[in-house]
Image: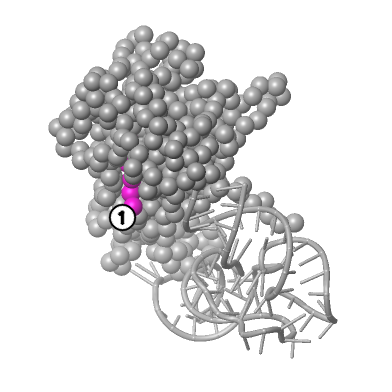
RNA sequence: GUGGCAGUAGCUCAGCUGGUUAGAGCGCCUGACUGUGGAUCAGGAGGUCGAGGGUUCGAAUCCCUCCCGCCACCCCA
């Protein structure tokens, strides 16, 4: 019988990669918290209807990428394909926007989409993001973008480009939609199969097409369809970004895949990401979402970033956390030594040191070799003699120097050694 | 979901047009060395060759199906 395999499109996080992963999540938490964003967690599954109405029935996500199921009570549920609708639902259901506006929240966790797996694209993947709910202002859009930008700065990731666009208000979009249809209808015969469908279902997505790139280039831009108010709103966002020193690229073809966007939309791109997945993340304003979910109309803005992709960028650019704190190996020699060594390790930990105990019955040279290979800064050896005298012998594994001392002075002596040269950076996966 | 390429020890890979018991390097374990590491030498463990079926006297090698990964679409994180 072959061993049970990991399901397609999923990943295990193993110890070798965990520090980098935790560092990325932790850095985002710090940066977001520094801007006033508090942690929220919402269910991994929600009512299917929430995504059908919120994310949009015409989107690829809802049409063909959801992990949906019926529970034993006959309820239609779906593993969350994105975080925004659930977070908005949670905030509005708890009436947090009655306490203060905007409500600033952040989140991180797994999302699920049934798209064909590839490097950087998985059935289960992690997103971290934030939402600012209850205020309609260019300032808040710019703030959200700035947090995403500062996050990458703090990581040290370079080469990210900010793509920016606006979709205006609903009336603007309808005007633009009409303009697009005027442009495309006469060209219908020259469109690819997908685009002919888009023409009927969601004309804005015509701009996504790479096959008909030539036609896209000739398509009208949204600018002329925008109301003066929408134009001013967008100009203000750009002005604020300029003021914050955040470079951005205007991308009038940027149409995000989800239905609920209005006004500002943006994506963060990086050329070096493997596969065709060059987007690290994206977001924008979604003033219409609350209403389609059945809540009072509530403006909001936010973003989501792909953790796997961000981690890949960090790995590629050699970025990561500071080396883990140095540690000591406590090695027992013989039965009496092994017993005493356990107690010595306990006392070192109580003194705040990281101590790994090796009290197996094997030869000392093997234990020393293992400790050295695994990166211990120092080895503490406890045999029958030491046990009897209440001492321990410790050895600096980089210099090879060695001395014995009383157990109660050991932590003090080792502390100096551990603070010495930093441990070489952990291996890259 | 569509099309293409791959899958051989823990890791990186070799294995010619089907031919005995499937190999190497690194890693792991053991011994030389009953209490002193990173070196060296010697030995050992570890593979149903991704899974199942077929062709053949004989299959890691050829054929089919499935699984999984990657690449390009689609789309996005």
Residue at 51% from the left image edge and 31% from the top image edge: A201
Task: State the residue in front, A327 or B27.
Answer: B27
Query: How many numbered markers are drawn?
Result: 1
Above or below A69: residue A358? below
Residue A267 is one of the magenta-drawn residues: yes
Residue B69 in the image, given as x and y percentages of width and height: 54, 56
Q: Which residue is drawn at 20% across and 28% down?
A: A235
In the picture provided, is A149 more to the left or to the right than A360? left
Looking at the image, can residue A118 be seen?
yes
Mark 1 closeness class: few <14, some 14–19, many ≥20 residues within 10 Å: few
Q: Quadrant of residue B49?
A: bottom right
Q: Give the range drawn in magenta.
A: A266-271
Q: Quadrant of the N terminus of chain A?
A: bottom right
Relative to A108, is A47 above or below? above
Circle 1: element type: loop
- In this view, the residue in front, A334 or A371, is A371
Picture quadrant of residue A244: top left
Q: Residue furthest left?
A: A243
Does the magenta portion include A146?
no
Query: What residue is pinned by disc 1?
Result: A317
Q: Residue at x 34, y 16 (%)?
A: A134
The image shows residue A138 at horizontal and vertical percentages of 25, 23
Foreground residue among A210 and A429: A210
Measuring from the top left, give residue A54's x and y in whole percent. 49, 23
Q: Is residue A261 visible?
A: no
Q: In this view, does B47 lie above or below A300?
A: below
Residue at point 30%, 18% (across, down): A136
Dominant secondary structure (helix, strand or loop) of the stretch shown in magenta: strand
Q: In this view, does B3 lie to the left or right of A177?
A: right
Residue B33: horizontal and vertical position, in percent?
49, 77
In the displayed structure image, the side of residue A219 where residue A126 appears, left or right: right
């Amino acid at each position: 019988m072959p061993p049970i395999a990991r399901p397609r499109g999923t990943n295990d996080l193993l110890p070798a990669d965990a520090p980098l992963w935790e560092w990325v999540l932790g850095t985002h938490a710090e940066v977001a918290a520094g801007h006033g964003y508090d942690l929220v967690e919402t269910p991994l599954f929600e009512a299917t209807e929430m995504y059908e109405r919120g994310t949009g029935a015409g989107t690829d996500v809802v049409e063909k990428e959801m992990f949906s199921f019926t529970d034993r009570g006959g309820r239609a549920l779906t593993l969350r394909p994105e975080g925004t609708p659930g977070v908005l639902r949670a905030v509005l259901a708890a009436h947090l926007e009655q306490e203060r506006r905007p409500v600033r929240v952040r989140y991180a966790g797994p999302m699920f989409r049934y798209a064909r797996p590839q490097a950087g694209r998985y059935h289960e993947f992690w997103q971290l993001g934030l939402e600012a709910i209850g205020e309609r202002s260019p300032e808040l859009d710019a703030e959200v973008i700035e947090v995403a930008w500062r996050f990458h700065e703090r990581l040290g990731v370079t080469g990210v480009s900010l793509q920016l666009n606006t979709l205006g208000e609903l009336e603007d979009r309808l005007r633009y939609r009409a303009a697009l249809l005027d442009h495309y209808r006469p060209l219908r015969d020259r469109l690819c199969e997908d685009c002919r469908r888009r023409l009927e279902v969601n004309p804005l997505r015509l701009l996504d097409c790479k096959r008909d790139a030539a036609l896209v280039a000739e398509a009208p831009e949204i600018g002329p369809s925008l109301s003066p108010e929408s134009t001013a709103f967008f100009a203000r966002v750009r002005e604020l970004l300029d003021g914050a020193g955040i470079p951005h690229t205007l991308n009038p073809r940027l149409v995000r895949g989800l239905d609920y966007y209005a006004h500002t939309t943006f994506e963060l791109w990086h050329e070096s990401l493997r596969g065709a997945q060059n987007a690290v993340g994206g977001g924008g304003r979604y003033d219409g979402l609350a209403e389609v979910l059945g809540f009072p109309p509530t403006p909001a803005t936010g973003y989501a970033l792909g953790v796997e992709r961000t981690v890949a960028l960090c790995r590629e650019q050699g970025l990561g956390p500071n080396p883990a704190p140095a540690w000591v190996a406590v090695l027992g020699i013989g039965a009496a030594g092994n017993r005493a060594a356990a107690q010595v390790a306990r006392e070192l930990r109580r003194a705040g040191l990281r101590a790994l105990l090796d009290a197996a019955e094997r030869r000392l040279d093997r234990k020393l070799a293992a400790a050295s290979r695994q990166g211990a800064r120092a080895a503490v050896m406890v045999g029958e003699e030491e046990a009897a005298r209440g001492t321990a012998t410790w050895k600096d594994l980089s210099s090879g120097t060695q001395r014995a001392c009383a157990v109660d002075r050991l932590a003090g002596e080792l502390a100096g050694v551990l603070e010495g040269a930093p441990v070489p950076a952990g291996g890259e996966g």
